[in-house]
Image: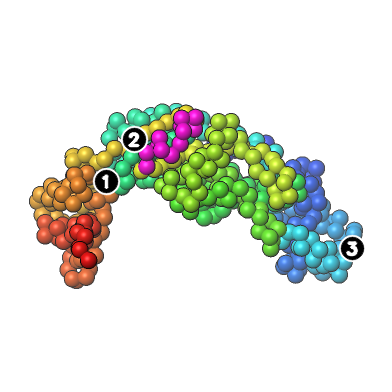
Amino acid sequence: MDRANSAENPAGFAHRAAITLQELDIPEAIVTELMVRRIYMDDKSDIESISRALRLSFPVVHSIFQRLREQQLIEVTGMSGNNYNFCLTSAGRELAERRLKVSQYCGPAPVSLQSYTAMVKAQIPKRALTREQLKTAMSDLVVTEEFLDQLGPALISQSSLFLYGPTGNGKTSVAVRLQRVYRDPILIPYAVEFDGKIIVLYDPAVHNKVDDGENGKEDLRWVLCERPCIVVGGELDISMLELQLDANSGVYAAPVQMKANNGILVIDDFGRQIVAPRNLLNRWIVPLDRRVDYLALSYGVKFQIPFATMVVFATNLDPQELADEAFLRRIRNHVYVEPCKPDLFDRIFDRLVVENKLSSEPGSAERLRALCLQASGGQLRACYPLDILNIIASISAYEQRPIHITKADLERAASIYFTKRLSRSAD
C-alpha cells in the first residue's frame, strides 16, 4: 500500500504526536481523568506503561504525572532513568472512584471531533478507476463486462448505489468486493471526544488494521486501517444508526455509518429489516443528500459528523415498492443484477471445479443447468453451482469416497437442494 500518498500527507496535521499539553486537541481534564482511571485499574504503574496504554507521548504523560504529583494524588514508588513508578494516594483513589462512576473508559486517549472531521474529509477517495482495475477487484467472480461498466461510474462518483434483482445472483458478493478497488489505507481513531464524552470508534471486528511499524513520531491515537466495508442485514434497525450508550461504563459506541466512514456500508437484504423500509430510508435522506449526519448524546446535545461512506443497498425486492421517487433520486446509481444466463452459469460451474481441483464427468455443467432450470421454474441463479457442489462434497464425505462429480450425484444433490411443491390433500 502506498502509505506516503494516502496516510501521511492527508493526516499530516494530526498524525504527528503531541509533545506538549498545549498541542493536544482535547482538554487536559480528559487526559487527567483517563490517567487516574488507568492507574486505579492497574493498581500501580509507570510513565512508559501509561504512555503505551493511552497512546500518548512520554512528555505529555510526564506533564500530567507532575501535576498529579503536585496535587498529592499519586506517590512515587521508584524510578529507572526518567521513568517513574507510582501509585495513587488515598486522595487519588477517591478521585478515581468518583470519576469511574461517570465513565469507566481507560483505553487509548480520544481525538477531538474537529480532528476526526478534518481527517475524514482529507481521506475521501480521490482516484480514477478503469475497467481493468474493477475487473481485477472482481476477478474471483464470473461477471460480464457490461455489468462492470455499470458499476464503474458509481464507484468513481462515490455516490450511493442500489443493487437489485432476483435472489442468489451475487449482489452481496459484488458489494463486498467493491472495497478492493481502494489500495490506500486510512487513519481511524480509537475514540472521539465531544462535550467531555468518549465515543469508541475503532472496532477490530470491522476495521482491518495495517501494520505500519509505529516509529514513535506518529500520533498513536490513530490506527492505520484498510478502508472499511461493513455489511449489515436483517438485524439493522434505527437504533444501530445512533450513538449507543453503555449505562454501566458511561461510554458511547459509534453507530455503524460512523464506523464505515471513508469506506463502504452495505445494507444487505434491504427491505427485510425489522424496521419498515420507509422509516429507514427517511433516516438516510439528509446524510445521502448533504453528506453530513447528526448524532445526539443521551442528554440531547446534538453534533454533526461527516457522512463520507458509499452506501450500497442490495435487495431482491422491487425498488419502486421500497422507496418513493424522491428517495430513489438521491440514490443516483441503480444497477440491475439480472438472472444468470446459461453460458455464465456453465462458466461458474467450470471455474468452481477447477478452483477446487475436482474431477467431473463430461457434460456435468449442462446436466446441472438442465436440473436447475427444471426445478426452479426456468430461472438460473449464480449461487446454484456452489450450493450443489457443497452438497456433493457432503454426500461424498458421508459415503467415505473421493469427490467425483457424476450426473447421478448432481441429480441426487439437486433433489436435496430444491424443495418440492406439496399437493394439498383433502381432509
Q: Residues within 10 Å of mark 2 (few under 14, many from 20)?
A: some
Q: Nearer the viewer, mark 3 or mark 1?
A: 1
Residue nearest the observer in this picture, 236 or 350: 236
- In whole angstroms, how far apart are the C-alphas of marks 3 and 1? 69 Å
Q: Secondary structure at mark 1?
A: loop
Residue in the picture at 31% in, 47% down: 168
Q: Nearer the viewer, mark 2 or mark 1?
A: 2
Q: What amino acid is found at the position of numbered circle 3 in the picture?
A: Gln
Disc 3 to disc 2: CB gap under 8 Å? no
| Disc 3: which residue | 72
Q: Which residues are magenta?
A: 317-328
Q: Nearer the viewer, mark 3 or mark 2?
A: 2
Q: Earlier in the sequence, mark 3 or mark 2?
A: 3
Residue 10's quadrant in the figure? top right
Q: Secondary structure at mark 2?
A: strand
Q: Is residue 368 left or right of residue 73?
A: left
Indicate which disc residue 255 carries. none
Q: Is residue 177 left or right of residue 214?
A: left
Q: What amino acid is found at the position of numbered circle 1 in the picture?
A: Ala
Q: Quadrant of the C terminus?
A: bottom left
- In whole angstroms, how far apart are the C-alphas of marks 3 and 2? 68 Å
- In whole angstroms, how far apart are the C-alphas of marks 2 and 1? 14 Å
Q: Say if the magenta span includes residue 19.
A: no
Relative to 301, say whether 35 is above or below.
below
Residue nearest the observer in this picture, 132 or 383: 383
| Disc 1: which residue | 382
Indicate which disc residue 336 carries. 2
Q: Is residue 159 left or right of residue 34?
A: left
Q: Earlier in the sequence, mark 3 or mark 1?
A: 3
Q: What amino acid is found at the position of numbered circle 2 in the picture?
A: Tyr
Q: Residues within 10 Å of mark 1 (few under 14, many from 20)?
A: many
Relative to 409, say whether 382 is above or below.
above
